[in-house]
Amino acid sequence: MNDTIASISTALGVGAISIIRISGNKAIKIANKIYGPKNLLLVPTHTIHYGHIYDKGNIIDEVLVTIMKGPKTYTTEDVVEINCHGGIATTNKVLELLLENGARLAEPGEFTKRALLNGRIDLIEAEGIMDLINSKTEKSRKLAINQITGDVSNLIKKLKQDLIEVIASIEVNIDYPEYEDIPVMTMQMLKDRILVIKREVAKILKASENSKIIKEGINTLIIGRPNVGKSSILNKLINEEKAIVTNIEGTTRDIVEGTVNLDGIFLNVNDTAGIRETENIIEKIGVERSLNLIDKSDLVILVINNNENITNEDLNLIDKTKNKNRIIFINKSDLEKKFNYDFSKKEKIVIGNVINDNGLDELKKMIREMFNFDKIEKGDFNFLSNARQISILKEVQKIINDIELGIKQKIELDILQIDLIKINKLLGEIIGEEYEEELLDFLFSKFCLGK
C-alpha cells in the first residue's frame, strides 16, 4: 500500500459533476502536477480550491479540488478529490493525466480495503458500506447504516471481551496455581459464563434472520394447476400485466418473475407453469422447473379453484408444500363453490376473487404477519447482515455446544480453553481482526470502482 491509487468515484456518464478520488502518500503531489494556479502542497488540510486541470499548458477542465491530509480521511492516507464536469471524455482525460503522473488505477473497493487495513473501519463496517450503496429500500438503508456506524461491530466486540475474560481467568489458574488470592475458575463458573455468551449469540442469530428478508426480499412462489388464477395474482400484486392471462390451459410455460415492494420489503414473485400431467415437451419442462422452485422459496402461495372439485394435482401440491411457509389462496369465490377439501384450522387461507381484487389485501396482511413485518419495523436493526458473518457465528454456536458437553463430561479446563480460543478467533474473523488475503480480495472485488 505504498503506492498512490486513483479512480472515478461517480457513475460514468453525462452529468453535472464527476468526482475523481486519489489516495496515497503522493496523492497531493500528483494532483499538484496537473492543477493550477495554486500550489496544493502548501494549502491547509480539509480545504477546497478552485482552479483548472492542465495538460502541457492546455486547460482540460474547470474544477474544484478538495485536499484532505491523513490520518483524518476515509483511507487514513492523504486523499484528493477532483470535482470536474461530468462529461465522459473530460472525466477520463483527468484520470488519464493522474495515471500518467504516477498514480495507479485503483482496484474495485480498494479505497475501502485501505480503510480496513489501516484500521479506520472493521470488516462489518466495510461490508456495510457496500450494502448502503446497494440498498434499495429504507429498511435496507437502516440495516447498512447500523453496520457503518459500528453498532453491529460492538455486539461482536462485547462477545469477544466477555470471552477473553474467561480465557484469561483459566490461563491465570493454569499458570499460577500457587497464588491463593486469584479467583479460581471452577467448572460451574465456566458453565455460567458460557451460558451468558451462548444466549447472546443465539439472540444475535435470531435477530439476524430478518437481515436476509430486508436485503434480499422474500422469494415468493405462486403455484397451482392451470387456469386457477396464478398469473392474475402476479399481475395484481406487481400492478403490471406481466404474465399473459387466457382461459387456455398451459399458457404459462416458464417462470414469470416480478417484484413487489411491500412496506419496504421486496417480494420476489415467481409465477409458474400450471402443474398438470402433459405430453407437451415445453410445458413439461416448465412444470418441472416450477416444482424445483418449491424448496428454494421462502413463501409458497398455493392457488386453488373454488369452482372445481379438488384434483389429484391439487392434493399432490398440498403435500409437496406442507412443510413450507404457505398461504392457500382459494380463487374465484364469485363462482359456485365446488371445492371440497377441509384444511386444518391452523392453515393460512385466503378466499378471494382476483378479477375484483377480493382477497389481495388479506393476502398481503397475512404475509406481513407471517414474516413479522411489525417486529422488523420496530427493531433496532443491530444484527449481522450477510451469509459470511452469520455462518461464522453459527460455527461459534456449535463450538459453544461442544464446550457445554465437555463441561458435563468434566473435561479439563485447559482442553476446553482450546475451544474458547477458537471461538475468539472466529469472532475476530467476523470483524476482520483475523482474515485471509484471498477473502478480502473476494469481498472487495464486489465493490464498485472508486469506493
Image: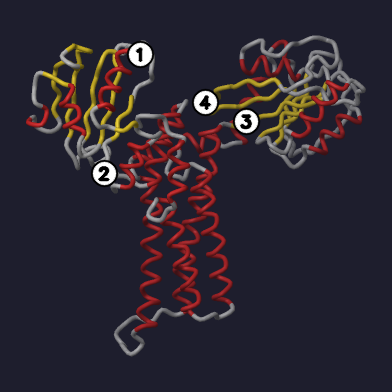
The alpha-carbon separation of the residues under discs 2 and 1 comes to 29 Å
| Earlier sequence position, callout 4 versus callout 3 | 4
Q: Which residue is mark 3?
A: 367
Residue at 49% across / 59% down in the picture? 199
Q: Furthest-bottom residue in view?
A: 178
Q: Nearer the viewer, mark 2 or mark 4?
A: 2
Label 2: how many residues lie within 10 Å, few (<14), some (14-19) or many (20+)? few
The residue lying toward the viewer, choosing from 84 and 334, is 84
Q: Position of residue 285 (x, y in %)?
A: 82, 26
Q: Which residue is mark 4?
A: 263
SS assignment at label 3: helix
Which residue occupies 43% across, 36% down? Answer: 143
Residue type pointed to by label 1: Ile
Disc 2: which residue: 2
Residues at marks 1 and 3, CA–CA distance in whole angstroms: 46 Å
Task: Give the mark nearest the N terminus, 2 or 1.
Answer: 2
Q: Percent x, y for residue 229?
A: 77, 17
